[in-house]
Every structure is written in C-alpha cells, then in structure tokens.
Image (tube, grey):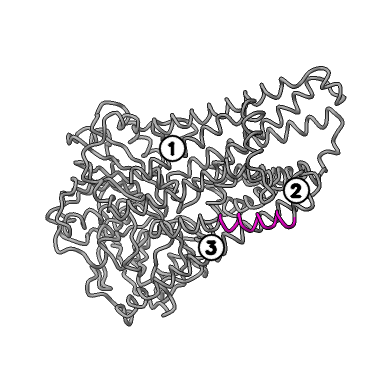
C-alpha cells in the first residue's frame, strides 16, 4: 500500500515540477521541441504531446489512488488508525489552527501550501514576462506599427492569461465529491471547498485582468475590430469574451453577502461554469485546453455518476418531528453501504423543487444502524421550512418522493487516537457530533473496545432546541445500556433564564408508506467501489483516445497534415468535447448499471425483511407517543446532562481544565464560535489541545 501511494506521490511531484519549468525559455524552446518531435503523430497531432505531459499524469494518479484506497479499505484502516498513538508533536504544531482574514480558519500546513502556490504563480508570471519582454525591441515594435510599451502591454496581457490557466488546471479538483485524488491525500470535498473558492477568486482576477489589458491594448492600437474576431485557425477572441462574461456573472454571485441572502441565485448562476469552460476551449483550442483537462475530466465523471444515482427515488421510512422546526429523516439503506461519521448527503424533494439539491450532514452510523440512514434538517431556509410544514402538519403526507446523491465523507476517521473528545456545537451544529457519538456507542457497546472520554458542549438559543439531544441515539437499535461510555453533556440555553413551565412542546415520530419501487440507498462508485471508479476513469480515457485517434487519422489529418493552419480549431474543439462526453457517459453508464444490478438482490432482501411498513416501531423510543421537552432517550443520557439557562459556555476555562494528554477539540457552529475555539487551541497555552473544525450542512 505504501509503495502504491509512493508512486502516486512521486508522479504528483513530477507534475508540479512540470508547472514550475513550463514558463522557462529552456523548456519551451528546447525540451518541448524535442518532446514534440518524438510524440507528434498522425493519430493525435500536437495535442498528443500536451495530453501526455499534462493530462495523463493526473489521470494516472487518480487510477493509482483508486487502487490504493481499495486496499486501504480492505485492510480496515479506518479502525486501525484510531488505535495508533498520539500524533507526532511536530506534525501537531503544523496542524494548529490560525485565523487569517479573508481565508478563515486554516492550519499552518494549509497556509504553507497556499503561499507556495502563490509563489508558483508569481514565479510563472515573472518568468513569462522576462521571456516575453526579451523579444520586444524598438525594431520589433516598429514592425507591428506599435510603441514598445504597447507591445509589452500585449505581452503582459497574454501572460496573465497563461498564469490564469495554471489556476484553472487545479480549480475543479476540490469539487469532485467522489474523487480518489482528494481521498488519496486525506481530504474531503466538503473541507476542500475553500480551496475551490480561493482558486476561483484567483482565476477570475487573472482572467479579468487578461481581458481588460487586451481591450486596453486594442483601443490604444486602434484594433477594436479584434474584439469581434473568431479566427478559423487562431485564437478566438469572441469565444474568450463570452467565456469571461459567463465567468464574471458566476463570480459576482459567489461573494458571501450575495450567496447567503440569495442562495438560489448563486446556485443557478453557478451552472454557467458549463458555458465558461466550453467557450474557454473554443478560445484557446483543444490542444492547449488539454492543460486544464484532467481536473475537469475527473469532475465530469463524478458529476455524471451523481446524475445517474439521483435518477431514482429512495425509501423514506420514517421521520421524527421536533418542536424546534427540525426533522430527522430516516431512510432504508443497503447493508453493504458504509460511510464514516461527519459524511454528508445531497437531497432533492421534487414536490418542493425539482432543481434544488441541498446538502445535509448524516446523523446516523453505518455500523450502529446497518439498515438505515438518517439526516437532520433544520428549518432555516424556504426549502427546509416547506419540508417541515409538509411533515409536521396535523395531517402529514404519508409518502414523499426523495432523490439523493452521496454519501460523501472522509475515507477514515481518527477520533479514537485521542484520550478525550471535546465537541463544541452551536444550534444545529450538533448534527455531525450525533454521528460521531453513535459511532462511539457502537465501538464501546458492540465491539467492547475502549473509546475516549466525551464532553459535549452545546449552545442553543431556546429551550425547544434541547430536543435535538433526543437524536443522539437512534429511534431503534439502541443498546440496552451505555455503561462503557464516559459521557458528559453540558447544554446551554442562552435566551431563557429559567426552564419553561407552560406550553410544553412534544416530539412526534411518523412512519411513512414508501412505494415498492422506492429503492434503499445503495453504494455508489467511489468510496464504496474504488476499483470500479478506477476502471471507469481508465476505460473512458482509453475510449476517448481511440476515437480521437481514428478521427484525426482518417478525417482531420488528411485535411490539415498537422499544420493547424487549415482545419478549423473550433470544429476540432467541438468534436473533441463531444468525444469526451460520449466516452464518459458510455463508461459511467456501463459501470453504474453493473453495480446497480449487483445491488438489486440486496435491495430485494431489504424490502422482503421490511415487509409492510408498520404504523409504529416497537423498538422506537417514541412508539408514536409524545415525549416531553426535557427528556432524553435513555436514563443514562439524562443523568449525564447538565442544562444551563441564561448563560453561554466559558470555552476557554472549560478547555484549559482538560488535563488528558491528547484532547481532540471538534467545533461546529457559527463563525464566531469556531474562531473562538481556534484561538484558544492555537494560543500555545495548552499543548494537549488538538483542534479540528467540522464542516456541516443542514
């Protein structure tokens, strides 16, 4: 396993080194010339060299990563890692959080890589300028009828675009949710979204500067007609302008104030990335676009697999309705589907909106609840409030069509490596901790293994929110006792100074009646099928190469003879994009169909076991009866819970009081809370505190 990962890391280092030398004169005028002389053929033309250097290494890493992750899963590393000793002190120091304005909470490792990437951009731009400006002389400028500064403006505008392409090559890696590359390096799509945001801002800044400088150049040199140029065998300026316009509209809606207040506008305009990429390829040609192809190629595979998974309805079995406008949806799932704590799942309810997909953190444990999967949904937005109204009304619906994508989450977790876990949550930020808690219940009560001490600190606005603690244990399948779990819960109600004595709220459990056509949630390719994903990546790329090679050999080459001066670059780009889409769609469909066929038998067994959906569950804590606000599912949880009214937790005092040698500090909640905990853990006053900010969706 280490050898396989070592090969992938070595190729990745080589890929990064290639980007370092790409702007240099030696690479472009000497090395690249020799490589093209050896690799240009009648099958792939000049495009073959670019794909060999920039596309193949990344796809090779992705396939090797799939093999590594398959063996890692087989070795059950997600449990063994938890038993390892405390984290290396030097590595712990680098993982300590820092709060950087504009970046948020980042570790020193993330900050170091961020500055190294910025250094790569600066190096590339300066080197490009040095090489480009060296060719500009008064004589060369005069031949074009320009002044020296005008020629340099032209050169600088081009180089801004080239550096923007470097960022674009990495832009789509963080948003491929089932990516083997992210998992290979221990990252998740949720935690990597911030990298996509950083890269997106840099890409659009550079491309905007690229476009502005060219417009300025055309104005000062009286070449404004260039803005309407769509050359047959050269750069298409119109396509570049259309790509930039699509990118600017998309970019404008990504800023926090707009995204939070008008999320639906942000969601729909983000689909302009399709026009952005398509016109980018028309702008630069498919040969040069192959530089940024691998990241987008992996994203397309991931996106189409998600599309295939989302086509059918899943079995929604029951829901728990909490008085704090919160729901717990319980789905039937295949027992071979495994996921880790803090995983997320995207949900679509067609009766509310066929287009809207919303991410929610999974609150269940695939080990403690092998036949079901649950998510908690807080009624904060218009979509979730409509869902709550449908299920909390006096006459709720008895069936609901639901489509899902996921689950997605970390390949493994290492919570067991700590002596103690301090979990700090604000409001619905308790959701990921519910899944962690249930997993630890399984570890101690079923596997009979030691788990770290648990201190759960939860802050709620109102006393009705205390009912979220009801969800710490599932409605069914609860162990008889929690004697082996060292648990303490400190709940804070900040807006009420004393317990409410009137108008007691109640919790309801509602059982639904799914159709026989509704399928249990089954494994998707990726975390539950790494070898299948690797096969799809490799087979689709081979299919694309074969089809492109035949097209070039028997259609394009007889016309163009590898000159790139006769056959339209736009037509070549369109044909290549069609071949890429067709190759991905065909191989993904075959792989998904084969897995669906394998899972069909398991789904039938689950439906036979379920039989007719019961009106109530004998194992449920509620049994369709009402539960008072202050109660908790088990007496042991009640005895472990302290409720504080009219105050906020003194996090600094609480954290510094923990004397265990290794204390994992997990926080999920409002930005202010996350920053407060991050500052405490990074202060250096307590070396035993190991901070981790948990992403969650509700």
- Residue 638 among magenta residues: no
Q: Are marks 3 and 2 in contact (CB under 8 Å)?
A: no
In what element is the residue under mark 2?
helix
Residue at label 1? 10
Q: Is residue 148 above or below residue 668?
A: above
Residue 138: quarter of image:
top right
- Crowd class of label 1 (few under 14; some 14 to 19; many from 20; radius 10 Å): few
Residue at label 2? 569
Q: Which residues are magenta?
A: 541-555
Image position of 150 (left or right of 309):
right
Q: Is residue 421 above or below residue 399?
A: above
Tell me which label, 3 or 1, sits earlier in the chain.
Answer: 1
- Residue 302 shows in the view: no
**Nearer to us in this view, 492 or 697:** 697
Residue at label 3? 587
Q: Is residue 385 above or below residue 17?
A: below
Numbered disc in front, either 3 or 1: 1
Residue 430 place in picture, x, y as percent: 32, 51
């Amino acid at each position: 396993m280490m050898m396989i990962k070592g090969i992938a890391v070595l190729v990745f280092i080589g890929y990064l080194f290639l980007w370092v030398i790409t702007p240099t004169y030696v690479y472009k005028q000497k090395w690249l010339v020799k490589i093209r002389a050896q690799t240009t053929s009648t099958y792939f033309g000049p495009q073959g060299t670019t794909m060999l250097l920039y596309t193949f290494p990344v796809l090779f890493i992705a396939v090797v990563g799939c093999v590594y992750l398959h063996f890692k899963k087989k070795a059950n590393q997600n449990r063994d890692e938890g038993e390892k000793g405390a984290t290396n002190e030097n590595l712990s120091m680098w993982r300590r959080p820092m709060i950087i304005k504009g970046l948020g909470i980042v570790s020193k490792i993330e900050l170091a890589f961020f500055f190294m990437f910025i250094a790569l951009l600066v190096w590339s731009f300066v080197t490009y300028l040095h090489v480009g400006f060296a060719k500009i002389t008064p004589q060369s400028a005069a031949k074009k009828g320009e002044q020296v500064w005008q020629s340099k403006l032209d050169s600088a505008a081009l180089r801004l675009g080239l550096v923007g392409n470097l960022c674009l090559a990495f832009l789509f890696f963080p948003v491929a949710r089932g990516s083997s590359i992210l998992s290979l390096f221990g990252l998740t799509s949720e935690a990597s979204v911030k990298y996509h945001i950083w890269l997106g801002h840099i890409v659009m800044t550079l491309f905007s500067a690229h476009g502005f400088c060219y417009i300025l150049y055309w104005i000062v040199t009286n070449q404004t007609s260039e803005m309407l140029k769509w050359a047959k065998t050269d750069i298409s300026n119109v396509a570049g302008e259309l790509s930039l316009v699509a990118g600017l509209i998309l970019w404008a809606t990504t800023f926090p104030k707009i995204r939070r207040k008008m999320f639906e506008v942000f969601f729909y305009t983000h689909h302009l990335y399709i026009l952005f990429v398509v016109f980018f390829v028309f702008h630069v040609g498919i040969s040069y676009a192959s530089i940024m192809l691998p990241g987008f190629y992996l994203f397309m595979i991931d996106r189409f697999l998600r599309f295939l998974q989302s086509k059918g309805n899943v079995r929604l079995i029951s829901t728990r309705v909490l008085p704090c406008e919160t729901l717990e949806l319980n789905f039937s799932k295949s027992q071979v589907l495994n996921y880790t704590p803090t995983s997320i799942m995207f949900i679509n309810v067609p009766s509310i909106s066929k287009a809207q997909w919303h991410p929610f953190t999974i609150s269940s444990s695939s080990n403690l609840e092998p036949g079901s999967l649950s998510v908690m949904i807080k009624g904060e937005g218009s979509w979730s409030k409509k869902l709550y109204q449908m299920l909390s009304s006096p006459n709720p619906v008895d069936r609901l069509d639901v489509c899902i994508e996921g689950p997605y989450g970390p390949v493994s977790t290492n919570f067991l490596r700590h002596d103690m876990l301090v979990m700090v949550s604000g409001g619905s930020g308790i959701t990921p901790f519910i899944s962690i808690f249930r997993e630890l219940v399984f570890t101690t009560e079923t596997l009979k293994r030691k788990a770290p001490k648990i201190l759960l600190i939860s802050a709620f606005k109102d006393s009705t929110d205390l009912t979220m603690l009801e969800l710490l244990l599932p409605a069914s399948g609860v162990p008889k006792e929690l004697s082996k779990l060292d648990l303490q819960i400190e709940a804070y109600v900040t807006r009420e100074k004393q317990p409410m004595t009137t108008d007691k709220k109640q919790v309801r459990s509602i059982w639904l009646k799914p159709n026989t056509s509704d399928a249990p949630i089954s494994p998707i390719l990726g975390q539950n099928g790494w070898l299948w994903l690797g096969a799809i990546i490799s087979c689709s790329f081979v299919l694309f190469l074969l089809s492109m090679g035949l097209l070039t050999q028997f259609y394009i080459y007889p016309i163009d003879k590898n000159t790139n001066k006769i056959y339209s670059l736009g037509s070549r780009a369109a044909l290549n994009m069609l071949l890429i889409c067709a190759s991905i769609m065909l191989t993904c469909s075959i792989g998904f169909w084969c897995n669906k066929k394998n899972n069909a038998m398991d789904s039938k067994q689950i439906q036979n076991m379920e039989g007719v959906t019961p009106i109530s569950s004998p194992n449920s804590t509620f049994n369709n009866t009402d539960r008072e606000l202050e109660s908790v599912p088990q007496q042991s949880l009640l005895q472990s819970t302290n409720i504080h009214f009219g105050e906020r937790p003194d996090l600094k005092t609480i954290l510094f009081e923990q004397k265990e040698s290794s204390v994992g500090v997990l926080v999920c909640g409002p930005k202010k809370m996350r920053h407060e905990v991050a500052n405490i853990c990074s202060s250096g006053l307590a070396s035993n505190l190991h901070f981790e900010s948990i992403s969650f969706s509700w």
